Image (spheres, rainbow, N blue to C red):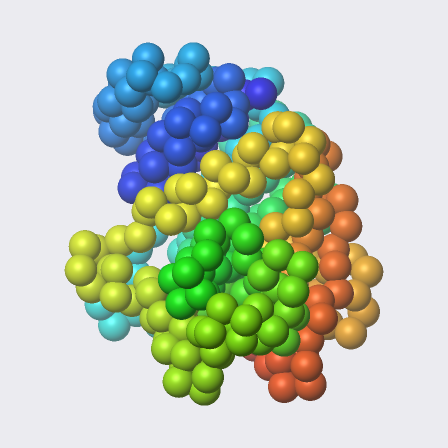
Amino acid sequence: MKVGIVGAGAVGATAAYAIGLMRAAQEVVLVDRSAALAEAQAADILHAMPFTSPARVSAGGYEALADAGIVILAAGVNQQPGESRLALLSRNAAVFEDVIGQVLSVVPDPILVIATNPVDIMTTVALRLSGLKASRVIGSGTILDTARFRSLLAGHLGVSSRSIHAYVLGEHGDSEVLGWSGARVGTMPLEAFAAQVRAPITRSVRETVDEGVRRAAYRIISGKGATNYGIGGGLARIVSAIAQDERAVLSLSAESETLTDYPRVAFSLPRLIGAEGLVAELSPSLDANEAAALRASADLLKQTADAL
């Protein structure tokens, strides 16, 4: 499969690198308003491929996206000092209007994967601007938050993070909801497994993990200015699931077409993803507090989307 990435900054370039390392696609094309940046990133990534993958990596204009099955949107503008969140959203919506129009002029029915923040609102924007089916406009959503949740639980329990099945839902942001009540390790409920390995999930543990998930991006950005490796890996995982028609369950942002209890806005739920995009969305197992928090998170996103 051929994958296009619009935006060759830290996130877009790292996603291209991860896609190559994972052999998730046969060809990756980088497009950026700075042709020199796109060409430099593509060349650097291409030179790493002989060590791990036969993937072809190149740069070009929008015409180079022809025949791409997936286009990742990682383009956007940065927030200026004193600028409101809504003003930033308005400027990024204007960027998307131009970018999506150019993409669709070359690739009329791609699967769009949205990485630009705030990703849930930008996924809704992309859906409105593109006119594509909701199943083909997919935000990275909480895929990274879910990975953080699992990695922190794995460290506490002393097991592989791949044995942990737990999801972060709702907004990719401050109102996100950690799904403690539905978490499993292997086939066992989290609490039962933790008791057996003598690593109980105490209130203190929950608070530490919650803070570690919810504040991770702030700490990383404070230390190095941006997050790129985690989300680059997450975007590569999404591409792999589509390219190989895995029908994998991932926490992704999209507008719900079946869950009528929530507003029509993009937010993250466990979703089944394959070659045609989103195949199904799952109603997660939540306790009463988590269910209320998820609804509040979706309502908050809806309010922001309506204001925009």
Q: Quadrant of residue 168?
A: bottom right
How many callouts does the rendering have? 0
Answer above or below: position of 226 versus 232: below
The x and y percentages for residue 114 are: 52, 46
User: Which residue appears at 63% of the width and 45% of the height?
Assistant: 137
User: Which residue appears at 36% of the width and 30% of the height?
Assistant: 17
User: Which residue appears at 25% of the width and 60% of the height?
Assistant: 221
In the rendered image, is residue 4 in sight?
yes
Q: Nearer the viewer, residue 270 or 159?
A: 159
Q: Quadrant of the N terminus?
A: top right
In the rendered image, is residue 89 in sight?
no
The x and y percentages for residue 199 are: 45, 74
User: Which residue appears at 41% of the width and 73% of the height?
Assistant: 209
Answer above or below: position of 146 versus 12: below
Q: Nearer the viewer, residue 220 or 139?
A: 220
The x and y percentages for residue 21 are: 40, 27
The x and y percentages for residue 6 are: 43, 34
Looking at the image, the residue that sits furthest to the left is: 223
- Horizontal placement of 20 versus 140: left or right? left
- Horizontal placement of 40 versus 88: left or right? left
Answer above or below: position of 271 versus 24: below
